[in-house]
């Protein structure tokens, strides 16, 4: 088992679902929380997290995000978070990472959302010789159509480094139909899209699943709750899935990973990627997420290598596929896998 764990740590990895603010280190999070009241609230949320049903756990996650959002108040903060996130991925042998974040302004608009985006992109560029990182801009489900359009405009403006558009946020807000015009425009300009789907077990969420599958985004995030018909549609359409084991385990209220839907889609040879979601908030690393899957579903080293190789085909920056596959091939030769 130690040998397999080491293999999961050493294999070159690809991260395709990582919310930048959710990657914040716990120590950094607490340093940025200046108010003792906020510190106490975070302590309470940490204790409550393992408890409750899907809805209450999801509410816990979004309250943590709200706390985090309130304490990130300037460009230095977001620069630090980006810097630390990339350092953490590098130390985990991640060779390609897509970070996603919702653009925001500071100081009542005095610092524009474009400056927020530029700060992240500049920090990413500093690390280009160590890790290939690309940015995906997020649209929050609570935003207006006009606000979402502004995010799309930013994605167009920085197109060389921004590789996709994401829909995320509180899944209690069913807003894909309202925001779909933005995603239709994204398709028209050949901008990749990824949409969080099936995060809650309620009927409204399941109904929205159909609308999202109809749209056929480039990738889908989570897909935790779904009907058999929706499963079959996604399998037939071959829409790649971003799965986040620790996050899914907690929000789906699973006793262990053996009932996770990785098994269903993997056995059907469906395009998949294993991701961290929020490595800081979930206290996980990509290597540990992969190890959990490998251990639970008894994948061999060769199968893991093949899985990671197919994951490379799912990245939004197609110019980087060959580089990622070359690094994986070199690793396999050094490891005598074949």
Image: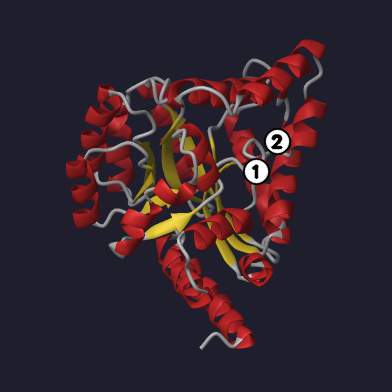
Residue 122: x and y in percent read: 68, 48
Query: Is residue 244 visible in this depiction of the protein?
Result: no
Quadrant housing residue 118: top right
Q: Residue at x 55, y 58 (%)?
A: 290
Which residue is label 2 attached to?
A: 78
Vertical order, 172 against 333 (above or below): above
Whether label 1 touches label 2, CB < 8 Å: yes
Query: Is residue 74 visible in this depiction of the protein?
Result: yes
Within-10-Å neighbours for mark 2: few <14, some 14–19, many 20+: many
- Res 144 label: none
Q: Residue at x 45, y 57 (%)?
A: 273
- In this orientation, which residue lies closer to the viewer: 94 or 158? 94
Residue 96: x and y in percent read: 57, 61
Q: How many marks?
A: 2
- In this orientation, which residue lies closer to the viewer: 215 or 7? 7
Vertical order, 325 against 210 (above or below): below
Q: Earlier in the sequence, mark 1 or mark 2?
A: 2
In the rendered structure, the answer to whether residue 231 lies left or right of residue 35 reads left
Residue 302: x and y in percent read: 49, 77
Q: Residue at x 49, y 39 (%)?
A: 255
Quadrant housing residue 18: top right
Residue 251: x and y in percent read: 48, 33
Q: Dot 2 lies on which element? A: helix
Q: Quadrant of the N terminus?
A: bottom right
Q: Dot 1 lies on which element? A: helix
Which residue is label 1 attached to?
A: 120
In the rendered structure, the answer to whether residue 261 lies left or right of residue 250 reads left
Within-10-Å neighbours for mark 1: few <14, some 14–19, many 20+: many
Q: CA distance from mark 1 to mark 2?
A: 7 Å
In the rendered structure, the answer to whether residue 298 lies left or right of residue 108 reads left
- In this orientation, which residue lies closer to the viewer: 86 or 306? 306
């Amino acid at each position: 088992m130690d040998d397999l764990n080491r293999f999961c740590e050493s294999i070159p990895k690809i991260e395709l679902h990582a919310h930048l603010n959710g990657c914040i280190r716990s120590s950094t999070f607490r340093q940025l929380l200046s108010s003792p009241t906020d510190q106490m609230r975070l302590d309470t949320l940490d204790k409550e997290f393992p408890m409750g049903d899907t809805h209450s756990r999801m509410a816990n996650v979004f309250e943590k995000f709200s706390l985090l959002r309130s304490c990130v108040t300037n460009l230095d903060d977001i620069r630090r978070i980006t810097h630390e996130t990339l350092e953490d991925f590098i130390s985990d042998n991640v060779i390609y990472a897509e970070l996603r974040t919702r653009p925001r302004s500071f100081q009542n608009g005095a610092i524009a959302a474009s400056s927020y985006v530029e700060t992240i992109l500049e920090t990413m560029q500093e690390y280009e010789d160590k890790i290939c990182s690309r940015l995906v801009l997020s649209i929050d489900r609570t935003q207006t159509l006009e606000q979402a359009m502004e995010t799309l405009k930013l994605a167009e403006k920085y197109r060389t480094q921004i590789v996709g558009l994401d829909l995320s946020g509180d899944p209690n807000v069913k807003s894909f139909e309202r925001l779909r015009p933005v995603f239709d425009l994204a398709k028209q300009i050949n901008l990749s899209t990824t949409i969080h789907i099936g995060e809650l077990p309620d009927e409204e969420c399941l109904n929205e699943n159909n609308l999202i599958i109809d749209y056929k985004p480039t990738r889908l995030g989570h897909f935790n709750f779904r009907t058999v018909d929706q499963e079959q549609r996604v399998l037939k359409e071959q829409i790649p899935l971003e799965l986040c084991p620790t996050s899914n385990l907690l929000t789906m209220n699973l006793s262990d990973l053996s009932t996770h839907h990785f098994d269903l889609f993997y056995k059907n040879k469906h395009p998949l990627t294993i991701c961290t979601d929020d490595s800081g908030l979930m206290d996980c690393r990509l290597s540990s997420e992969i190890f959990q899957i490998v251990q639970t579903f008894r994948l061999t080293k060769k199968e893991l290598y093949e899985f990671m190789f197919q994951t490379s085909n799912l990245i939004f920056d197609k110019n980087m596929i060959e580089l990622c596959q070359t690094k994986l091939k070199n690793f396999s030769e050094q490891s005598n896998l074949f």
